[in-house]
Image: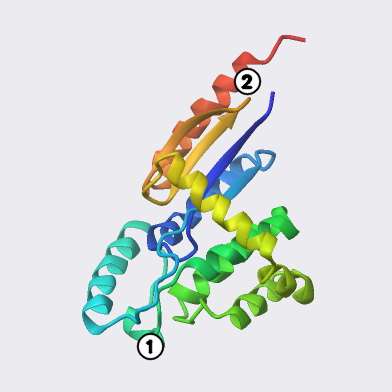
Amino acid sequence: MTQRLLYVMDPLCSWCWGFAPVIDAIQAAYPELAIHMVAGGLRPGQRDPLDAASREALGEHWEAVEIASGQPFLSPDDLPEGFVYNTEPPCRALVVGRELDASNVWTLVKAIQHAFYAQALDVTQTALLVDLAEQVGYDRRAFSESFDAEITRAAIAADFSWTRDLGIAGFPTLLAQRDGQLALLTNGYQSADEVMPLLDRWVAAGEARQPAC
């Protein structure tokens, strides 16, 4: 029996940053359960800088996520002037990290999230993404080369397409997959107290299906 979790997210989705402790809790409770990360694409291809009104609206949203999740947030006003909220580069970093070392990609994604939300750094910049990847253990040259490779652009397009085809419009989305069959655990933010019982029941159901020795 093959089973794993599929986590559809965007590193620059604030509710996904809020959901990070839930993924940590899942990994702590079920270290043997693989989590395959999928880049959903929140705002890929954005070109216009955030204006004052957008920063204000975003600040209200981030405050709500901070209250619900307890995760640290700075203000959107702390982001660099002229910041363009294009989530494609961080999503591409996710894909590169997944392909180079899937066991380390969650550490990379959390580093990107923390740099953006808790430090207000412009993580749409390739150089910073490569720096963060190197800091969490990726080979700098390999990561940089893969980041600009055509195969990576094809892989991220495939992630975006798969997400759309499945009808996933909100992040975070956590799916449980067993023998090719998908079950929805959550679409949208939920706390660990809400998600873990759902996962526990799914795991228990799989164990009940195991043939007796």
Image mark for residue 23: none
Q: Which residue is mark 2?
A: 207
Q: Residues within 10 Å of mark 1 (few under 14, many from 20)?
A: few
Q: Is residue 39 left or right of residue 34?
A: left
Q: Earlier in the sequence, mark 1 or mark 2?
A: 1
Asked whether 156 or 190 is in front, the reply is 156
Q: Residue furthest bottom?
A: 81
* Image x and y of residue 76, in percent: 34, 79
* Image x and y of residue 167, in percent: 40, 41
Going by the numbered disc 2, the residue's amino acid type is Glu
- Residue 195, by quadrant, is top left
* Image quarter hosting the C terminus: top right
* Image quarter hosting the N terminus: top right
* Image x and y of residue 81, in percent: 37, 90
State whether residue 195 is above or below residue 70: above
Determine whether the residue tagged by mark 2 lies in a helix, strand or loop. Answer: helix
- Looking at the image, do the residues carrying marks 1 and 2 touch, with CB atoms under 8 Å apart? no
Q: Is residue 196 left or right of residue 31?
A: left
- Residue 165, by quadrant, is top left
**Residue found 33% across the figure and 61% down from its top:** 65
- Picture colour scheme: rainbow
Q: Which residue is mark 1?
A: 82
Q: Is residue 71 left or right of residue 92?
A: left
Q: Residues within 10 Å of mark 2 (few under 14, many from 20)?
A: few
Going by the numbered disc 1, the residue's amino acid type is Gly
The residue mark sitting in front, 1 or 2, is 1
Determine whether the residue tagged by mark 1 lies in a helix, strand or loop. Answer: loop
State whether residue 199 is above or below residue 102: above
**Residue found 57% across the figure and 39% down from its top:** 5
Q: Residue furthest top?
A: 212
